[in-house]
Image (cartoon, grey):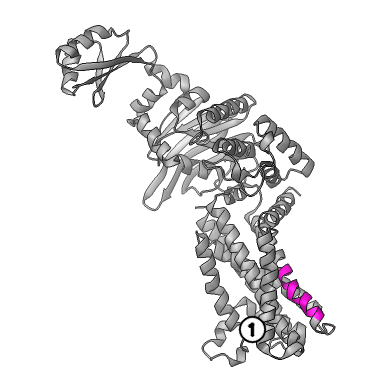
Amino acid sequence: MTTDPSSSAIIEVGELTKRFGDVTAVDHASFQVERGELFGFLGPNGAGKTTTINTLIGLARPDSGIIRIDGLDCCKNPKAAQHLIGVVPDESNLYPELTGFDNLCFCAALYGMGKPARIARATQLLKDFDLSKAAHRKFGGYSKGMKRKLAIAAGIVHNPPVLFLDEPTTGIDVASARNIRQLLADLHRSGTTIFLTTHYIEEAERLCDRIAFIVNGRIVKIDHVASLLKPVQGRYATLINGSGLNPSFIGELSSSFPGLDFQQHSQDRIRVESSSPIHIGPIVKFLEDKGVAVTEARRVQLSLEDVFVQITGIEADAMQKEKMKAAA
Amino acid sequence: MKAWIAFWNIVLKDMRAYYLKPPNISWGLIFPVAWTAMFFIKSGRGLDDVLGLLPGVVAISILFGTTSMLAVTVTFEKKGRSFERLLLAPISLELLMLAKTGGAILFGVVNALVPVAIALFLADLSGVAWGAVVPAVVLIAIASTFMGLFIAVSVSEIFEAQTFSNFFRFPMIFLCGLFFPIAALPVFLKPLAYVLPLTYGVDILKGGFHGGNIMPLALDFVGICLFCMVLFYFSLKNIHKKWIV
């Protein structure tokens, strides 16, 4: 249960455990986040993502383990590193009765910034986040996308070297989500270390340097995105839809088309995977001869989502739907 | 210095966001005026008894003003999760909670000034021992605010904060010697009177306004200061236990 003293990591977590009664929310989690890295933390609802963040930022006390931020022991003193971190929680928790500008000035004051400095910083951030026009409107009247942007601005108002973001794009429209991803990429380029939890796997794939998968409180895999993608690189996959497809065909297809890997993907859908391009014609003909009405055959690009499913056994679609339902 | 910037801005933010809102200003003015008028009419002793009424009216104005506001605002911020922002600020929990209570304490003191200002026009206040009254007002405001804080950290819903406040406030009004002298209380209720912070505050006010205190003022000051410390200590302990899980 030690962390490497020679490490260049800015966040070091060793054997972190957090229980709520009989439930172990985080189970001996160990990982490090390098300085300037964009680190993704992926897992389904209830996997322990938010609990992990809360213990790191000092809103929850770990039962055991080590947490160091920039070498400061946050288990002994949860306040030790709070001046170094910015937090954007999964809900935009600014003050609805204050304007966007006043919210930012207030958040800056919480970190001890003097009046001229906080006015200048708030004005700059509102400009950078394209919120200048809404600067003097009350936060309570902002749209969801604007609220998320202002929450991110509030998280970085004191220029923290480490930023924790919990589900930054959940429940907002596509354009706002895109805008926020761009802002995160810019922050990453400027050298801020970002700890990001998200259920959007493609978002993590696009933005993150390294990713940890957490399931039932345990970290099941941590690696660079490129390394995580290796098992699916050079692989081809096709989805075939048709009425009358049933699991009994899988065995027949596998023996008739050696070298291809067939899986029942869902009802009326099978998935074919191979290390070489898949010739779909003979497979369609085989199925039609068996009485299946094939309606669609479509090539799919293998991605981190497939890696996630392979490692965790959790369908990414189900995870996203569950999360969207919760956000709605 | 940095911590004090945070402290002062939390106080200012609360004043702007909650205490200086028109409904709360009117509450802060109307409530003490209504209490004063009610006691004045009920006593039936005309202007001669204004000094006798003042300790009770001042104490009740502070008690209701502070506990109502703080318990609700803290619970509201906790529910909306904006309180997490404060918990994440790099200042000690003690200073943070002093800042959160600072606005309510000021609000309580202003509430106390209303009946005193009315009394200035109705009675001769030249004999009042302001050296005792002013610190008593501040200490009652602090003790009541910390009681509001204790209530706020013990509940999770705003309606619970309101009902839980009354659970403390109403027995306190009847037992602290405001309506009935403590000596006239039934034997089994007398000890209860001495475990209420308001008993000591009211006794100082009585001593300050008309010399009617039943305990030495020094004991009253020690008593109410102890209550302030105990309530603040247990509120912080509750925050550690309940909010930083």
Compared to B15, does A204 lie above or below? Answer: above
Compared to A297, does A309 lie above or below? Answer: below
Give the farthest residue toward the right: B126
Residue under the image location 65 percent in, 68 percent down: B65
Say what amino acid the circle numbered 1 marks.
Leu
Residue under the image location 69 percent in, 34 percent down: A132
Query: Image quadrant of residue B147?
Result: bottom right
- Chain name for mark 1: B
Residue A240, percent from left and from top: 27, 17
Q: Is residue B41 visible?
A: yes
Location of the C terminus of chain A (image quadrant)? top left
Compared to A85, does A245 lie above or below? Answer: above
Query: Image quadrant of residue A272?
Result: top left
State the residue in front, B175 or A223: B175
What span is colored magenta in the figure?
Answer: B109-121
Q: Main secondary structure of the magenta part?
A: helix
Secondary structure beneath disc 1?
A: loop
Residue B106, percent from left and from top: 72, 64
Mark 1, residue position: B178
Residue A138, percent from left and from top: 64, 45
State the residue in front, B74 or B234: B74
